[in-house]
Structure formats: C-alpha cells, structure tokens
Amino acid sequence: MLNPPGSKKKITVGKKLFFLAAGILLLATLVTTFFGKKGFIDIQKQKKKYEELEARIKDFDRQIEKLKAEIEALETNPQTLEKEARERLWLIKPEEKLIIRKRTGASGQ
C-alpha cells in the first residue's frame, strides 16, 4: 500500500471530476462576487451614487435655509420688500423716472 519512491500516483477520473467541479464552482463564486447583482462592483457604484445624492441633499438644504432667510427678510424688513419689488416688477414711485440701458456685449447685442 505504500508506493515505492519512483512510482507516480494515478489520479482517478472521479478525483479529476471533483477538482474540475470544485474549480468551476470557485470560479463562478468569484465572478458573481465581483460582477453579479449585489456584487462588489455594483456595491461600489451604489455607494458612489449614495454619496452624490447626499451631496445634492446638502445643497438643497442650503438653498432652503437661504430661501427661508430671504422670506424672513421680506416679511420683516420693508426696505428689502421694496428693493425686490423694484427689481423684479420694475415698480417705481410716482416722482421717479425709469432709465433702461441696453446691454452691449462682445457679440454686439
């Protein structure tokens, strides 16, 4: 039952099939781990998307705070309200004159 030192071991067909099946299973596991749905690469893409969405949420929160401050200023400060009305609606007082200047740009408009 001991093999002499110069003899080669023969690997049976059953063992070859077992190693082949184990190798295929290992390869399939590795491929699905990295490239499959919910795999490593997909998780990395989702993390990046999540971070981008968090950044957008922070931007929106800053815009909300800015708009809340602007609303508060318009509700409490009459000068701010008057300034906005003059700029956005082109309102003028009865004794004032409105002067409109044409814009001149590099394109000649």
Image (spheres, rainbow, N blue to C red):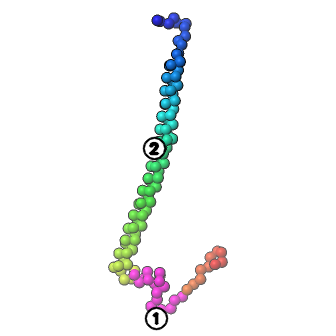
Against 80, is 12 above or below?
A: above
Q: Residue at x 53, y 15 (%)?
A: 11
As drawn, the residue found furthest toward the front would be 14
Q: Which residues are magenta?
A: 81-99
> Measured from the top left, where is residue 47 in percent x and y?
45, 49
Q: Which comes before the other along the chain, label 2 or label 1?
A: 2
Residue lying at 49% horizontally and 38% vertically, measured from the top left? 32
Q: Of discs 2 and 1, which sits in the foreground?
A: 2
Amino acid type assigned to the residue bearing label 2 in the image: Lys
In this view, the residue farthest toward the bottom is 95
Image quadrant assignment for residue 81:
bottom left
Residue 15 percent location from the top left of the image: 50, 19
Which mark, residue 38?
2
Q: On the image, which quarter does residue 38 sit in?
A: top left
Within 10 Å of the Cα at label 2, are there few (<14), some (14-19), or many (20+) other Cα atoms? Answer: few
Q: Residue at x 59, y 80 (%)?
A: 103
Residue wearing tag 1: 95
Query: Residues at badges 2 and 1 in contact (C-beta under 8 Å)?
Result: no
In the image, what residue occupies the spot 42% across and 56% down? 54
- SS type, badge 2: loop
